[in-house]
Amino acid sequence: MKLTVEHSGNGVAIIHAEGKLNMVSAAQLREEVAATVAAGSSRLVVDFARVDFLDSSGLGALISGLKAARQAGGDLRLANTSDQVKLVLQLTNLEKVLSTVDDASTAYANG
């Protein structure tokens, strides 16, 4: 999985992910989120525009990231989720925990 981080100011960082978010890449996302929060960005968006698969290990990484962001006074939101990702979130009832938005750049436009 390829991850790039874009800092857009006001403590907001967009993590652009590309590839599969599975047991192989979940640790990489956890580490990137932890580093981003430690660097002062606690309002995170994980951009799923180029993610074509999500499994339970990936969900664990997202929940871990959500916890880290909230402990730092922020939040973690998902943007540009595919139908497969939406289905996984619905089947696990995590769509109630992980907020999704249509556009990463406006994820925190209203606060």
Image (cartoon, grey):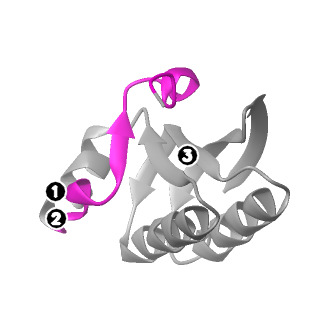
Magenta stretch contains residue 101: yes
Q: Residue at x 38, y 25 (%)?
A: 102
Q: On the picture, is 4 further left or further right than 91?
A: right
Residue type at tag 3: Val
Answer yes or no: do the residues labelled 1 and 2 have beta carbons within 8 Å? yes
Q: CA distance from mark 1 to mark 2?
A: 5 Å
* Start-end of magenta stretch: 92-110
Q: Which mark is residue 66?
A: none
Q: Which mark is residue 93?
A: 2
Mark 3 and mark 1 lie on one chain; the one further toward the N terminus is: 3
Question: Which residue position holds label 1?
Answer: 90
Q: Examine the rendered structure and indicate whether residue 30 appears above or below residue 48.
A: below
Residue type at tag 1: Gln
* Numbered disc 3: secondary structure: strand
Residue type at tag 2: Asn
**Where is residue 27 shown, x and y percent of the image?**
65, 76
Tell me the crowding category of disc 2: few under 14, some 14 to 19, or many 20 or more residues within 10 angstroms, Cα based. Answer: few
* Numbered disc 1: secondary structure: helix
Magenta stretch contains residue 15: no
Q: Which mark is residue 46?
A: 3
Q: Residue at x 68, y 62 (%)?
A: 33
**Where is residue 8 shown, x and y percent of the image?**
74, 28
Q: Examine the rendered structure and indicate whether residue 64 appears above or below residue 75.
A: below
